[in-house]
């Protein structure tokens, strides 16, 4: 009756589609919070984003709260802002949090079936002066061996205090081998092409330290971890001259060899290793509806025109390549 009532309020010429699921099917949403867990001495506002999950029963209603509210004035002030926030992003004013204190931010997402999920994020205010980091890409990176991979982090020093400088560096935490990075002391790094291993996982960490020029001591630091997943790249099977040939019928005595050259085929991850490729050829004759495997396993084969025994026959030549670098 609710659905019928809602449809009756629409224009008679409009069309709506309603998907009804069984009550036994799960429609419980999921949610996680993304944001800084540590706020520095000079930090201002910090955005906390709620990522709602689950394809069923969207859209979500967002309800924010400060759950460890003990009644202090600054806690009540943050709670008021949280209660007024109905979007997926909560702006936490770090200047209202006293040094050494922490707050737990909670968000509850509810779908239109009143199913809900809750997530928490604990945020601490520390005495350190932390650098401000902005990422140019997601910390979860999909890379290909044949391509360069660039990662850049924008670093800024908080303006609340002078006589500060920032030192940055990169280090590798995980991986089947050590990566040769373009520079480990710059906010930007480039992973050269052909330096990653296919179907492998690497983990890189970027660290930024704020150092006092007067005392030459570290007053705060922040780090971010990048996960690099190297995906497989399909082999490229290529035949010179294109994929079709038109061959005139000639007497058997005048038969000649037609050369088929697939030497330009390549493994994009190992372009300088053509010897790593192996070739398998098969031929299909449309006039006889038969397929045969050719003995040759080389990149270049010769096909005699005497095989074209009937006019207007169609021969389909198939090339299959494999590489020692791929299973």
Image (tube, grey):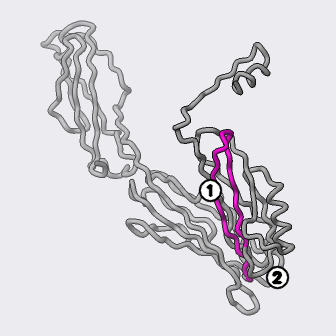
Q: Which residues are magenta?
A: 103-127
The image shows a total of numbered marks equal to 2
Towards the viewer: 26 or 325? 26
**Residue beneath label 1, please?**
32
Between 231 and 25, the one nearer to me in the picture: 25
- Which percent across, then down, holds residue 111? 67, 43
SS assignment for the magenta stretch, majority: strand
The quadrant of the picture occupied by the N terminus is top right
**Who's the residue at 24% across and 43% down the image?**
278
Magenta-drawn stretch contains 201: no
Task: Say above or below: 54 vs 315.
Answer: below
Q: Residue at x 68, y 63 (%)?
A: 35
Viewer-nearest of labels 2 and 1? 1
Q: Nearer the viewer, residue 169 or 181?
A: 169
SS state under label 1: strand
Residue 100 bears which disc, if any? none
Answer with left or right where residue 282 lies relative to residue 200. Answer: left
Please tell me whether mark 2 sits on a helix, a strand or a loop.
Answer: loop
Q: Which image quadrant is residue 258 in? A: top left
From this view, report whether residue 219 is shown above or below residue 155.
below
Q: Where is mark 2, residue-wise?
A: 162
| Disc 1 crowd, CA 10 A, few/some/many (<14, 14-19, 20+) | some
Q: Is residue 105 magenta?
A: yes
Q: Is residue 182 above or below residue 16?
A: below
Q: x, y (%) of residue 226?
A: 55, 63
């Amino acid at each position: 009756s609710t659905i019928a009532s809602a449809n009756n309020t629409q224009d008679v010429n409009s069309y709506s589609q309603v998907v009804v699921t069984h009550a036994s099917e799960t429609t419980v949403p999921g949610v996680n919070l993304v944001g800084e867990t540590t706020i520095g001495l000079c930090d201002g506002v910090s955005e906390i984003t709620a990522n709602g999950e689950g394809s069923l029963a969207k859209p979500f209603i967002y309800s924010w709260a400060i759950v460890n509210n003990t009644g202090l004035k600054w806690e009540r002030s943050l709670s008021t802002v949280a209660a007024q926030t109905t979007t997926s992003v909560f702006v936490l004013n770090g200047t209202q949090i006293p040094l050494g204190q922490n707050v737990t931010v909670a968000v509850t997402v509810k779908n239109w079936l009143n199913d809900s999920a809750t997530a928490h994020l604990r945020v601490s205010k520390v005495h350190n002066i932390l650098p401000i980091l902005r990422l140019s890409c997601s910390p979860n990176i999909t890379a290909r061996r044949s391509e360069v991979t660039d990662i850049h982090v924008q670093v800024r020093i908080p303006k609340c205090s002078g006589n500060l400088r920032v030192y940055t560096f990169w280090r590798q935490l995980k991986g089947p081998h050590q990566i040769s990075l373009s520079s480990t002391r710059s906010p930007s790094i480039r992973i050269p092409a052909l330096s990653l291993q296919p179907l492998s996982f690497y983990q890189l960490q970027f660290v930024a330290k704020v150092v006092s020029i007067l005392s030459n001591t570290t007053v705060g630091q922040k780090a971010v971890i990048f996960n690099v997943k190297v995906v497989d790249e399909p082999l490229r099977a290529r035949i010179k001259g294109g994929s079709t040939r038109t061959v005139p019928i000639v007497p058997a005595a005048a038969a000649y060899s037609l050369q088929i050259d697939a030497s330009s085929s390549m493994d994009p991850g190992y372009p300088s290793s053509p010897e790593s490729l192996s070739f398998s050829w098969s031929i299909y004759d449309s006039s006889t509806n038969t397929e045969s495997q050719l003995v040759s396993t080389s990149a270049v084969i010769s096909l005699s025109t005497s095989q074209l025994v009937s006019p207007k026959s169609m021969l389909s030549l198939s090339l299959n390549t494999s590489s020692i670098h791929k299973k």
